[in-house]
Image (tube, helix red, strand yellow):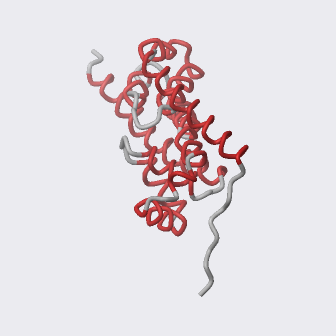
Amino acid sequence: MIMEEKPKFTKAQLIIRIALLVLLIAGTVLLILNREKIQHLGVYGYPGIFLVSLLSNATILVPLPGVMITSAMAMVFNPFWVAIASGAGAALGELSGYLAGFSGQPMLEKSGTVKRMTAWMQRNQSWTIFILALVPNPLFDMAGFIAGAARMPVWKFLFFCLLGKIAKMLAFAYLGAGIFSVFEW
């Protein structure tokens, strides 16, 4: 039986990973404290929608109401382009969870549950990320943590996250636009 060696991290690598994790946590706190200001970025059109979505998804474990803003913006702008801008921003924002998992990998490796989830994620990477990005849920950050800790290629994480987020945002954008059209006279 061949024993798999755990990756050894140098002191510098551990310091960089811990610093990245601290920055992500500080960024999450900053975004939560300024959530009202972030929501007003939608007045800047599609770039504003992209930024709102990016910032609402850049938090770790504390979701901000990005899909509600997507629905509201689709009442004013073209729902298709709202979904594209919102989905792209959301996918990039989810890198925070991925980076937290990547930077916290030495700490996560000790947990038996995380080891099992990582093994499962390595076998089903693409579908897991796509489905979890498609379904509205506050636990997507955990998928990002596991993907980062499992060293899933970042391009693959972003690609399947983007597909799932755009599909989800299309549903919310057209739902928002449809609700608005019901109330038009």
Identify the residue at horizontal 62%, vertical 34% (top origin): 19
Quadrant where the N terminus lies? bottom right
Numbered circles on residues, count = 0
Question: As rendered, which of 102 and 87 lies closer to the eye?
Answer: 102
Identify the residue at horizontal 70%, vertical 46% (top origin): 11
- In the picture, measured across the screen, residue 55 lies left or right of residue 137, that is right
Identify the residue at horizontal 54%, vertical 65% (top origin): 122
Q: Is residue 160 positioned above or below 87 on the image?
A: below
Q: Position of residue 124 (x, y in %)?
A: 50, 66
Identify the residue at horizontal 49%, vertical 60% (top origin): 127
- In the picture, measured across the screen, residue 170 lies left or right of residue 151, that is left
Question: As rendered, which of 119 and 64 lies closer to the eye?
Answer: 119
Q: Is residue 89 positioned above or below 152 on the image?
A: above
Question: As rendered, which of 16 and 91 lies closer to the eye?
Answer: 16
Q: Is residue 135 positioned above or below 1 on the image?
A: above
Q: Position of residue 93 (x, y in %)?
A: 55, 35
Quadrant where the C terminus lies? top left
Q: Position of residue 79 (x, y in %)?
A: 47, 30
Residue 172's quadrant in the figure?
A: top left
Q: Position of residue 139 (x, y in %)?
A: 38, 45
